Amino acid sequence: MRDATPQTIYLSDYKPFGFDVTSVELTFDLAPNCTRVRSKIAFEPKADAERTFFLHGKELKLISAKIDGTDVSPALSDDGLTCTVPDAPFIWEAEVEIDPENNTALDGLYMSNGMYCTQCEAEGFRKITYYPDRPDVMSVFTVRINGPHPVLLSNGNPVSQTEGHAEWHDPWPKPAYLFALVAGELVAHPGSFTTRSGRDVALNIYVRPGDEGKCAFGMQALKDSMKWDEDVYGREYDLDIFNIVAVDDFNMGAMENKGLNVFNSSAVLASQATSTDANFERIEAIIAHEYFHNWTGNRITCRDWFQLCLKEGLTVFRDAQFTADMRSAPVKRITDVIDLRGRQFAEDQGPLSHPVRPESFQEINNFYTATVYEKGAEVIGMLRRIVGAQAYDKALSLYFDRHDGQACTIEDWLKVFEDATGRDLTQFKRWYSQAGTPRVTVKDAWYAGTYILTFTQHLKPSATTPDPQPQVIPIVTGLLSPSGQEVVSSQVLELTEESQSFTFEGLAERPIPSVLRGFSAPVVLESELAENHAAFLLAHDTDPFNRWEAGRSLAKASLLDMVRTDAAPDTQYLDGLRAVMSQGDLDPTFRALMLGLPSQSDLATALHDAGDTPDPDVIWTASEKMRAAQAEHLKEILPGLFADHQVPEPYKPDADQSGRRSLANATLSLLCRMEGPERAQRQFDKADNMTQQLAGLSVLLREKAGDAALKAFEEQWKDDRLVMDKWFGLQVMQADPDQAVATAAALTEHPDFKWKNPNRFRAVFGALAAHHAGFHAAGGSGYKLLADWLIRLDPVNPQTTARMCVAFQTWQRYDAQRQTLAAAELDRMLATPTLSRNASEMLTRIRG
Ligand code: 0A1
Ligand code: ZN
């Protein structure tokens, strides 16, 4: 049944729970269809607590309930129970039955390939037992597991392990969303770490038998993360053991359960033969992210789910710092900004726009968004830029000292910065409450030795932010002389007014400004400078981000011209690109990024912003023409670039080798446009690692010469799920626009299209949604195919369905015919009688 009118929850309605939970004991008797869960929970009423309490509970069969040993008969509803309770401390005991095998939604306790595992964030614990399932209720857990499995895991430290039984105790008070249990036929890849105070911690990565050979990289990433958090944040690990488990069926990337992180197998398993360089880098970052949550998320958690960015923004910021330290800081920044613009800016421009700290929701699982995570991290980056690195460190120490063991709010977080620095952050706080991407325009003027930069900020009013106020925008700026010398080095200009000027005195010549260096604020910058300096900055900027940005803005301007007027590709851009590509001392990864073009969806966003209606086919054609022009313009240097960046040494997924491979592969793609597919075929045939094999296959598919390679690849990898996900996805990604939907549809007929597995579903439909011209095919076939499958998936897995609905978020920017077709599919989905609350909220917001 479709949920009756879904309830909206408001931040302003927050009320503390009336009871403390002083201890929790859980006993699990595992069985696929009838797991019994016994709970014994000590409650203490707070002063003036009511005499009834409400415990969350969903899809539970209550067997018995007792208070202080006496049977009670609580009133049951769809979402929990209400019971009269004593006005003194009491013990609640309940026994419930659950059905993990039929839990296809993958939250609560469920089964994946014969193993038991849990996912409790945000509100999955209520599917395990009756409990105050809210993050501000923190308690100490003891867990006993009975089941015929060699591995039985839960949070904390092991107390006892005998055949068929295990007991775990977690001494650190935690909210229920951090509870985890795993049981199954698993094997451990062990490791160890000695903390800086000399405590030995046992480390394990648990995997299904056969995957043992894919754990070494993740283990090293874990040790690096533990060391980094000690060195950089002074944070030490706090249990005797840290376990990671790889699970094939998982809705997200991974989960930071205390002492027992559960990972989507795609986010932890890695090997030379099966993982690309990009996979290795992502795995390193996710392992770090989950580990860093131990302090930012677990020791200090969120008071309520509106505060999600408190843990996620900070932890994304920390994992980005880690990756920047482990690899190349400029490259990390550039790739993060590409991602931010692609996902968060798109979200902010459309019907799903919301503040970093939302003020209402129906389904919290729909708010694990690019805005909460990525913009949340940008906000912290700005804070650090404004107060400075030292003050940031001081504030963080205060945060850990003051709030350890607490469930906190954004107010607590900002207060720490105010107390540590003496600054008033009232205005800065608007970054948390105002939705949308500010636009900043910059103008300049020059009067005999004085240079003036004037910035103006504008935020479009929206449903959640009807009356936007100016924000604090740190604009890191440097000035260059016309000969390319840095005459004023980077400094933070703090834009706090709607419009503000900054003056630079004593300059010999009119300088060239380099503004928003390092992308110092998540804004759209519009230049009204007297001159366009992009070509100069592409050649001379000392800030690597802005150098890349200059190339990107030339490419974007040229592509937009090509789309609008069928203009030829801009030779100034192509000349500048050739100069950069020829610079042998520049980091190969950086040069590979320089070859990248703005995505077709980003171009559509820019056109829409400027009041035009984007035509996906025209954008596709322009992008293809630009690729051809790049190939033609660089043709003298491409063979050399390709040859010089081959990696003859034994494979390593480090920054150096992966940089060389990424440049060689970007070059390969351009070379094959001119010379045909042979080089790609040779690379595919002799590849000894997945990066090279997949790059070869991509080019072969694009050159329509991939049939044999595709078969060979399938034959080689048919038993490896993660590699087969790549096989499914790549065919859609590399299809021509008029073939993408048919390719996706054909793949759904493949016997290995196991659509209930989120990774496989996303491989096909994530790729289709990301194929701009394919998904938005003029006849609406992309909209229809995705809607058909979302309708099918929703009753099985509402969370993944709701997340995939995001593909439709831009529907209103296209032409009338496409809008009509998309609206019809949105309405068809909305009319599904059994639609989940998750999908219903997303589709209602998107439909508008
Ligand atoms: N906290 C995790 C993300 C996560 C969120 C929800 C999940 O299930 C609905 C699972 C994981 C993180 O930030 O990594
Ligand atoms: Zn996280």
Image (cartoon, rainbow, N blue to C red):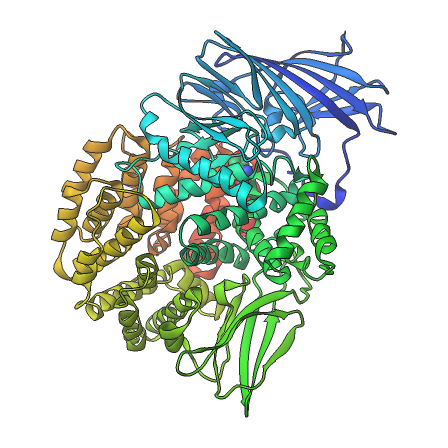
Residue sitting at 27 percent across and 56 percent down? 663
Q: Is residue 94 left or right of residue 353?
A: right
Residue 436, located in which quarter of the rendered image? bottom right
Q: Nearer the viewer, residue 794 or 399?
A: 399
The picture places residue 90, in percent across and down from the top left corner, at 79, 16
Question: 455 and 706: which one is in front?
Answer: 455
**Marker count (numbered):** 0
- Side of 90 relative to 313 (left or right): right
Instruction: Residue 613: tell me if it is visible.
Output: no
Q: Among all residues in the image, which is located at the extreme right?
A: 48
Q: Position of residue 46 (x, y in %)?
A: 83, 28
Q: Quadrant of the N terminus?
A: top right
Residue 469 location, x and y as percent? 68, 66
Rendered position, 529 above or below 342? below
- Determine whether, in the image, residue 74 is placed left or right of residue 610: right
Q: Residue at x 65, y 30 (%)?
A: 175
On screen, residue 238 above or below 777: above
Write down which quadrant ligand 2 falls in: top right
* Residue at x 30% of width, y 58% of height: 588
Indicate the quadrant where residue 523 lies. Answer: bottom right
Residue extending furthest bottom? 448
Residue 56 percent location from the top left of the image: 67, 26
Q: Residue at x 65, y 40 (%)?
A: 305
Judged from this view, the residue extending furthest toward the front is 198
- In the figure, residue 333 lies in which quadrant? bottom left
Q: Nearer the viewer, residue 445 or 86?
A: 445
| Residue 47 visible at all | yes
With 246 as the anchor, is 55 left or right in this view? right
